[in-house]
Structure formats: structure tokens, C-alpha cells
Image (tube, rainbow, N blue to C red):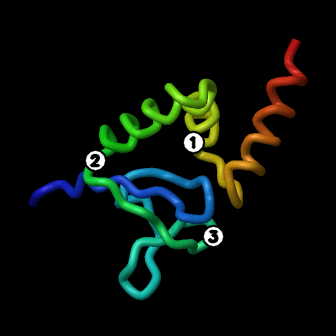
Amino acid sequence: MVKDNRFVYGANCTWYGPIAEAGSFGGLPVCPHCGGVLFEMATEKEWTDSVANFDARWPGYRALVEWTKGRHFADYLEAKEAYDREHQSKP
């Protein structure tokens, strides 16, 4: 059996992960938390490279995205607000 290496991420939410971890609705992969539509990349490396490229233009983006792993937010504005609150409260 060939492993499915596709990596998916929320079109309208912050969830991302291997396609095997996605939910399903009518046979289509969806966010396992909110059921939202997912975008797809061929591999996780393609995803991490795109995050790194964006981080080069917006420093701190990679840290935010990595922090959201295992969390679910409606969008990255909500995630950024939670990230900032958590990191401001640390000494």
C-alpha cells in the first residue's frame, strides 16, 4: 500500500495536518474540529516550506503556526490574539 503524503490545512480555520488526520464529509476531507473546507499540498515539506517563506516576510509567523499545532481557532487573527495573551503572561 502506498502512503498518502498529502498535507491539508483549513481554508477558514487554523487546523493543519496529514490528510489521514482530517475529518470526512461526503467523502471529502474536512477539518476534524469544525468541518470546514481544507486546502491541500502534496507533502508536509511543501507546507513547512510555504510557512518558512511567509515567515521571511512576516517574522514570527512560523512560531505562531507551530504554536497552533493541536489547537483550533476560527482564523489566524483569533489565534494571534490567543498567542499574544499566552506569551505576554510569561515572565
> Which of the 4 image quarters holds residue 87?
top right
Farthest residue, direction bottom: 26
Closer to the N terminus: mark 2 or mark 3?
Answer: 3
Q: Nearer the viewer, residue 35 or 76?
A: 76
Residue depth check, mark 1 versus mark 2: number of the one nearer the observer: 2
Q: Nearer the viewer, residue 33 or 53?
A: 53
**Residue shown at 22% from the left, 57% from the top:** 4
Q: Position of residue 39 (x, y in %)?
A: 42, 63
Closer to the N terminus: mark 1 or mark 2?
Answer: 2
Q: Is residue 53 above or below residue 3?
A: above
Classify 10 Å Cα crowding around label 3: few (below 14), some (14-19), many (20 and above). some
What whole-number distance in Å separates the C-alpha atoms at marks 1 and 2?
17 Å
Q: Mark 2 and mark 1 in contact (Cβ < 8 Å)?
A: no
What whole-number distance in Å separates the C-alpha atoms at marks 1 and 3?
15 Å
Q: Indicate the amino acid at tag 2.
A: Thr
Quadrant for the N terminus in the image: bottom left
User: In this figure, which residue is indicated by the disc labeled 2?
Assistant: 43
What whole-number distance in Å separates the C-alpha atoms at marks 2 and 3?
23 Å
Numbered circle sitting on residue 34: 3
